Image: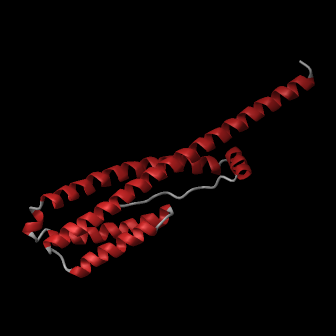
Amino acid sequence: MSPFVAAIAFLAVVFLYMRSIYVRLADLCSAGDSLWSDIDEMLSMRHDLVAALVETVEKHGACEKRILDRVGEVREEAMRATTPSERSRAESVLQSTLESLFALAENCHELQSSESFIEQEKQLAYLGNRIRYARTTYNAVIRELNARIDTAPGRLIANLVKYRKREYFELDNP
């Protein structure tokens, strides 16, 4: 084999290797975007459910107005958050506020026997489980993406196509 053919073969192998790194980075970015979109949609559904829950509690007069107002304010803040870290903080505050609301609701027997309240509480729990699963999957994809960007060949390709490391979505208890 001539040196020219060997050089061409070597460059072809290097090109194919770099292309495979690019394709994997692109796939991970696409998967991360898709998973984040799913999480965003589920959080929006959760926010709508929280609004319906507040209406149900208001109908039964089971809580002080200031607590319901606080839940509404925190919900609005959570809806305005956009990045994973902002969403994490806002959703944690919302969850804490909801726990306070549920603690007060436990003392209201009329509310505890309300079918709509019970159903909304179940839906929130179900949605929380879906969000937890989606968060775990999203973070696994982002972990792999960030690891590939941190490695030498991946960093080179990522810099060329302007892929950046992404934030994890941390949430204690949705």
Please provide percent x and percent y for residue 108: 10, 70
> Height in image: 95 above or below 45?
below
Please provide percent x and percent y for residue 153: 71, 44
> Height in image: 138 above or below 121?
above
Q: Give the quarter of the figure containing the N terminus.
A: top right
Residue at the far top: name it: 1
In the figure, is residue 65 to the left or right of 82? left
Please provide percent x and percent y for residue 80: 45, 69
Q: Give the quarter of the figure containing the C terminus.
A: bottom left
> Height in image: 9 above or below 51?
above
Residue 77 seen in render: yes
In the figure, is residue 5 to the left or right of 39? right
In which image quadrant can residue 125 be found? bottom left
- Looking at the image, which is closer to me, 122 or 2? 122
Colour logic: secondary structure
Q: In the image, what residue occupies the spot 44% across and 50% down?
A: 38
Residue 174 seen in render: no
Q: In the image, what residue occupies the spot 56% across and 56% down?
A: 166
Q: In the image, what residue occupies the spot 58% across and 47% down?
A: 29
> Height in image: 34 above or below 62?
above
In which image quadrant can residue 11 be found? top right
- Looking at the image, which is closer to me, 120 or 165? 120
How many labels were placed on the picture? 0
Please provide percent x and percent y for residue 133: 37, 48
- Looking at the image, which is closer to me, 117 or 92? 117
Q: In the image, what residue occupies the spot 11% across and 71% down?
A: 107
